[in-house]
Amino acid sequence: MNKIFKRLMFMMLCLCSSSILFAQDAPGSDELMRSNGKIYVVVAVCLTILIGLFLYVYSVDRKISKIEKEN
């Protein structure tokens, strides 16, 4: 019963989050950002954040592997 409840709650969470995402669309915002060149700034910031996260995870993985080898 607990497993079914967890799956149901997860499904409801996914449905609610997807409906919120559709509400974020503003008409003409993509053309405005593209015409001003700001879309490239947004993409650069997102890539910088993702690269930083990947480097952090890689460094933590190396540290954990080193600690595991010592033990």
Image (cartoon, rainbow, N blue to C red):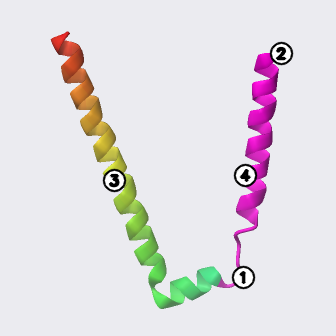
**Residue at (29% x, 30% y) in the render:** 61
- Tell me, for residue 17, which label it has, or none: 4
Q: Position of residue 49 (x, y in %)?
A: 38, 58
Q: Amino acid at mark 2?
A: Met
**Residue at (45% x, 72% y) in the render:** 42
Nearer the observer, disc 1 or disc 2? 2
* Crowd tier of the residue under label 2, counting other residues whose Cα lies within 10 Å: few below 14, some 14–19, many 20 or above: few
- Give the CA distance from mark 1 to mark 3: 31 Å
**Which residue is labeled 1 in the image?**
27
Q: Earlier in the sequence, mark 4 or mark 1?
A: 4
| Magenta-highlighted residues | 1-28
Nearer the observer, disc 4 or disc 1? 4
Q: Earlier in the sequence, mark 1 or mark 2?
A: 2
* Crowd tier of the residue under label 3, counting other residues whose Cα lies within 10 Å: few below 14, some 14–19, many 20 or above: few
**Which residue is labeled 3 in the image?**
51
Of 2 and 47, the residue lying toward us: 2
Labelled pair 4, 1 in contact (Cβ < 8 Å): no
Rendered view: 41 above or below 59: below
Q: Earlier in the sequence, mark 3 or mark 2?
A: 2
**Residue at (60% x, 80% y) in the render:** 30
Give the SS element for disc 1.
Answer: loop
- Give the CA distance from mark 4 to mark 3: 26 Å
* Crowd tier of the residue under label 4, counting other residues whose Cα lies within 10 Å: few below 14, some 14–19, many 20 or above: few
Q: Earlier in the sequence, mark 4 or mark 3?
A: 4
